[in-house]
Image: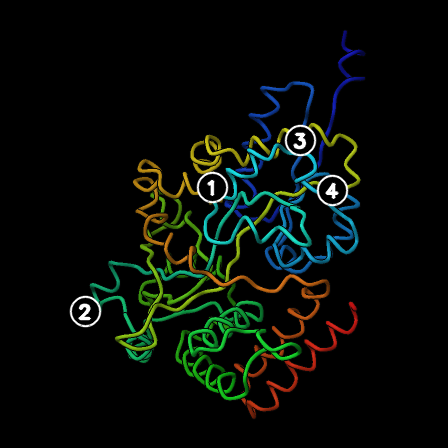
Amino acid sequence: MNHHLVEVMKELTGITWNHTRGYLPMVATAQRFSERHPEIVINWQKRSLQAFADAPLVELASRFDLLVIDHPSIGEAARHDLLLKLDQHLEPKFLADQAKNSVGQSHISYAVDGHHYALAIDAAAPISGYRADLLTRAGAEPPQTWSELLALAHRGLVTVPAIPIDSLMNLFMLVDALGDEPFTVPGFMFKPETGKEALQMLRELVNLCEPGSFARNPICTWQFLADSSRVAYCPFAYGYSNYSRHGYAANLLTVGGLISLSPSGTPLRSTLGGAGLAISKQCACPESALSYAQFVASPECQSTLYANSGGQPGHRVAWQDVALNVATNNFFANTLRTLDSAWLRPRFPGYIDFQNVASSIVHHYLCHGGPESTVLAKLNQSLQSAQRANL
């Protein structure tokens, strides 16, 4: 009997990123799925958040069956035929439910050239977050406008993630807020006048923030805020519901939407993040992988096991779940509108390479200054180079 079990056992490997939100729900769902399907074993490994953002999918898809991926890499995946086309394997009814219950553009972010390559099991975008106790102690309120944010920053109460990738995402957001949606004109990121103003605004803010901001990603930013004895507010960082759950960190964070540039303006529109569950084209047991993927992405799993294991679901039912919001200090209810309005980045082949170069250019400017016209010229050159390389 044991020999027979070994022969029929199917083993899948997966790769995700090394945070409670990225790793634990995959382990929990894999364990439960294997309990229901004893013939299938799923082993998850993890990588850093930075590697999650920019590691080449070509290499990962050759080593793993299941991949938790970032949507800007979908163009690369399609170009190299790395992933299963889920629309050719899953029931239209299932995908229609995923589309109908998408948080913002999460679902369509994994579609390109008429095919769907991942299920949006995780949804995220930059949101605001703060320590209510520290703001109260400082006699301050969460800012509503850019000028109020700067005033709070002048008091030393503000931090923001300002590593290269987040600096670029924040630049996209500010350019959009100034009325110039990025990448509208082929070969150019945005108009010179709005690019210059957005760069100056972002540099002013970041240089008023706590000095460690330049080295912190969103995870480190929320952890820093939870541990802080003074810094109380973050205006925009990719949300992590974990820090709004009792018992996770030293202090509970409260989250909300984004500020406006002016009292009469609309809230900032941040840049969509999140994560999708994809299946490698080289997977030896695609039917098992597809069955597991559907289990994880189902509204039942998303709003219970997945979310309760520290995950940040991609299914809208979970974001509207009363019990889940009670457990997370209303994290999901307070930020759903922000995610629904989030801007979707380009996903052309080569975008990841461009993003890496552009991030470094913006980060260098924020740290050291210099002519904004030079920064914008370098950004446009890097975009044009990436596009030419992938014609």
Against 141, is 118 above or below? above
**Dot 2 amino acid type:** Gly
| Pointer 4 or 3: first along the chain | 3
Q: Is mark 2 on a helix, strand or loop?
A: loop
Residue behind mark 2? 139
**Dot 3 amino acid type:** Ile
Which numbered disc, 4 or 3, marks the residue closer to the eye?
Answer: 4
Gap in angstroms between the C-alphas marked 2 and 1: 38 Å
Q: Is mark 3 on a helix, strand or loop?
A: strand
Q: 13 or 281: which is nearer to us?
A: 281
Mark 4 and mark 3 in contact? Answer it, CB < 8 Å.
Answer: no
Residue behind mark 1? 315
Q: In the image, what residue occupies the spot 50% across and 87% down?
A: 196
Give residue 145's position: percent from left, percent from top: 30, 74
Residue farthest toward the top in the current orientation of the protein: 1
Which numbered disc, 2 or 1, marks the residue closer to the eye?
Answer: 1
Q: What element carries label 4?
A: loop
Residue behind mark 4? 280
Which numbered disc, 3 or 1, marks the residue closer to the eye?
Answer: 1
Gap in angstroms between the C-alphas marked 4 and 3: 14 Å
